[in-house]
Amino acid sequence: MALHGPRWDWPLSKPVQRVDERYAARVAYHYMFTVETGPDLSKARAVVDHLDGWIWRCSDGWTTPVQVWIDEGEIGDDGGRWVGVHGDDFSPSAGARNATEARRLTELGLAFYSLLRSAPPFRSAAVGAEVVGFGDYTHVARPQREIPRGYVHYDNIPGFVVCDAAWVAMEQPSSMVVFAEGFHWFPWDGESLGRYGLSLTEIRPANLMRSR
């Protein structure tokens, strides 16, 4: 599933959670992973250190380094900061365009979530197209029943991870399950697998090798 960021807490013209791929191609959306760490810049730096310095190798031998950065252009309403993870070769579009890309992006996403389970403290995380800025904490950490129709509801977005403090503020939605100690998520279903006849059960995370 390709999320479209940033600022999905704004109202949507339609309650749709997929990017129009023709529009995405024109504006050059890029597939990436993001982690919202709160307003403390030292926490963002700690997450960068944890995620940086890896080479990601998929099962078909395809390998890519990634860039990890603290985004200076997106700051949440309470000062929250986003860490972005993106590889130039991930995908030049909003999501997979064929079965090979679907498998690779899913392997990369699974590897990202594997790293995230041992990451320093953070508040939320997402996978998708240009998702830096997605999931402003002031909109996430609130009862989801209070969010009007046509706005983003964070309790049913595949791959969206929240800290337990946010999950409690969301009134502990049953749609979200334990991700790791201190975190819940709506389980991720991979990237466009069904479209290409693939199953998440047959895919394993990309191998991670230290580059430094």
Image (tube, grey):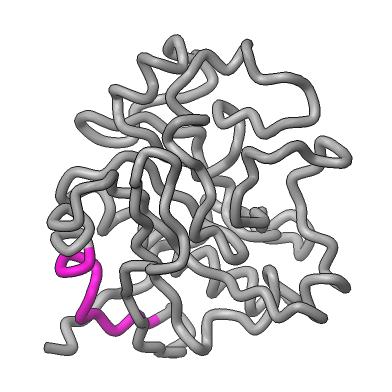
Q: Residue 206 versus residue 142: which sits nearer the camera?
A: 142
Q: Position of residue 206 (x, y in %)?
A: 38, 71
Q: Quadrant of residue 67?
A: bottom left
Query: Vertically, is 70 above or below 162?
Result: below
Q: 120 left or right of 203? A: left
Provide the residue span drawn in magenta.
48-57
* Count of marks overlaid on the render: 0
Quadrant of the image containing the C terminus:
bottom left
Determine which quarter of the picture holds residue 33: bottom left
The residue located at (28%, 53%) in the rendering is 116
Q: Residue at x 50, y 88 (%)?
A: 88
Question: Along the horizontal axis of the image, is 131 left or right of 194?
Answer: left
Q: Is residue 181 above or below residue 75?
A: above
Q: Could one spot residue 119 in this view of the protein? A: no
Asked whether 141 or 125 is in front, the reply is 141
In the image, residue 130 lies at what x, y percent?
Answer: 58, 65
The residue nearer to you, when weighing 105 against 196, is 105
Position in image of residue 99 (x %, y %): 70, 74
The quarter of the displayed image where residue 178 is located: top left
Q: Position of residue 56 (x, y in %)?
A: 34, 80
Residue at the (38%, 42%) spot, across then down: 124
Residue 31 visible at all: yes
96 relative to 132 in the view: left or right: right
Q: Is 33 colored magenta in this rendering?
A: no
Residue drawn 23% across and 75% down?
Answer: 52
